[in-house]
Image (spheres, rainbow, N blue to C red):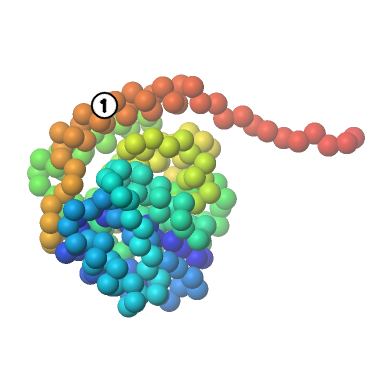
Amino acid sequence: MKISVVVPVRNEAENVETLIAEIDQVLNSLEGYEMIFVDDGSSDDTVAKLQSLLQNYPALRVLKHRHNCGQSRAIHSGVQAARFSWIATLDGDGQNDPADIPALIEICQQRNDDQLWMLAGFRHQRHDTGWRQFSSKFANSVRQAILHDHTPDTGCGLKLFRRDRYLSLPYFDHCHRFLPALMLMTGGEVISVKVNHRIRRFGKSNYGTLDRLLVGIVDMLGMMWLKKRYSLPVVSEVTRG
């Protein structure tokens, strides 16, 4: 199973080297893998740091957005550039643990099912502030009640999914938080898997709670409209009798 690891980063100069080393240590035994770090308009030394690491890690590729376009667009840019058919995503702050990726790969290989399109990480023991945990749990509960995506933690950056299925989904800003719902809506299966969650060692979050709340309301309305308008046909080809 060949895999492309896509990591969106913005102002994470202090975190990228450790994260790259961890990914390489975990996945370098695979037959084929690559890691694609997508810089989303950083204003610190993130790009320079990534560039300096290219010679040490042959599997590393670095993409750069000239301007900040948002996390969803950074993920999309990375997936478009990916060479392999399965994509793993991680947040660039180091709170997702790359050591969880092999377990997700093993589940896919055991299932060997074309209908399994995504495995979504579930941070069952989070290392965040109390307010961030509360707001996330509340948002996840509201989203599940409305969209019925049966996913307890869509905000977890650790996911494993099929590249072709992802690229066939409708794209919009902030769509990365609705990927399980979009996958289910278009006919795939999504499994949630408990994963590790770590303390952020350096830097701070690029996304505030209020920012996520405001855009989340608008996005939820958009998803409700999209689900109502979407139809999933059952197609068969008629052959000569």
As drawn, is 21 to the left or to the right of 239?
Answer: left
Q: Percent position (x, y) of residue 194?
A: 31, 53
| Residue plotted at (30% across, 50% down) | 66
Which one is in front, 181 or 207?
207
- Quarter of the image for residue 133 reads top left
Question: Which residue occupies the extreme right position in the image?
Answer: 241
| Residue plotted at (40% across, 47% down) | 76
Q: Is residue 41 above or below residue 148?
A: below
Q: Percent position (x, y) of residue 92?
A: 26, 57
Q: Is residue 95 visible?
A: no
Q: Is residue 111 above or below residue 189?
A: below
Q: Is residue 214 above or below residue 156?
A: above
- Quarter of the image for residue 147 reads top left
Query: Which residue position holds label 1?
Result: 217
Which one is in front, 68 or 178?
68
**Could you tell me which quadrant the C terminus lies in?**
top right
Which one is in front, 209 or 41?
41
| Residue plotted at (51% across, 65% down) | 1
Q: Percent position (x, y) of residue 162?
A: 49, 51
Q: Percent position (x, y) of residue 207?
A: 19, 43
As drawn, is 171 to the left or to the right of 50?
Answer: right
Question: Which residue occupies the extreme left position in the image?
Answer: 130
How many numbered marks appear? 1
Q: Is residue 71 above or below residue 217?
A: below
Q: Secondary structure at mark 1?
A: helix
CA neighbours of label 1 inside 10 A, class few (<14), some (14 to 19), many (20+): few
Q: Amino acid at mark 1?
A: Ile
Q: Is residue 126 visible?
A: yes
| Residue plotted at (44% across, 52% down) | 79
